[in-house]
Amino acid sequence: MDDLGKRIKNVTHELKDYIETKLELTLLNFGDQVSYWIGKSIQSLVGYTILAIGLIFGMTALAIYLGEVLDEMWAGYAIVASPFIIMGLILVILKPKAIVRSIQNQILAEFINSLDEEDPIKELPSKENSKKEHN
């Protein structure tokens, strides 16, 4: 009976170690995913900001050029601004659901791809395996 008690105690101790290791691994994987998404978001934000600044300077230059060609500065700015105003009104008034769904699908696909890139855990090391490796 004493041997059975020791074995039960050993199994419960190993189960406790397994659960603690699994919990720690899950937290590390979650932290890795969060840090990946934060880094990717910051990179995208910086890239889109630089692109937007370039677009603003380009559109301003085009507006000045068109204003000089037409001899009316306001006309150059109106011509350049009109496509942006029209697109903005369409997006604000119509609120196309297809665009929202497309963005959601793209974000979901990127998230799933990032999860697939992880190496799955094949086997957690146990104390017995680590003792054998050390000997």
Image (cartoon, rainbow, N blue to C red):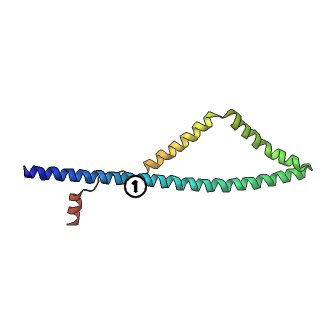
Mark 1: amino acid: Leu
The answer to whether 46 is drawn above or below residue 106 in the figure is below
Give whichever of 94, 109 is nearer the camera.
94
Give the quarter of the image for residue 54.
bottom right
Could you tell whether 131 is left or right of 77 in the image? left
Q: Residue furthest right?
A: 71
Which residue matches tag 1? 28
Could you tell whether 61 is left or right of 119 in the image? right
| Residue 101, x across and y down, in percent | 57, 36
Q: Is residue 118 visible?
A: no
| Residue 113, x across and y down, in percent | 47, 47
Could you tell whether 95 is left or right of 76 in the image? left
Q: Is residue 85 visible?
A: yes
Say which element carries label 1.
helix
Give the quarter of the image for residue 51.
bottom right
Give whichever of 76, 95 is nearer the camera.
95
Please give the name of the residue rendered at 73% of the width and 37% of the height, measured from the top-left corner.
89
| Residue 115, x across and y down, in percent | 44, 48
| Residue 124, x across and y down, in percent | 29, 54
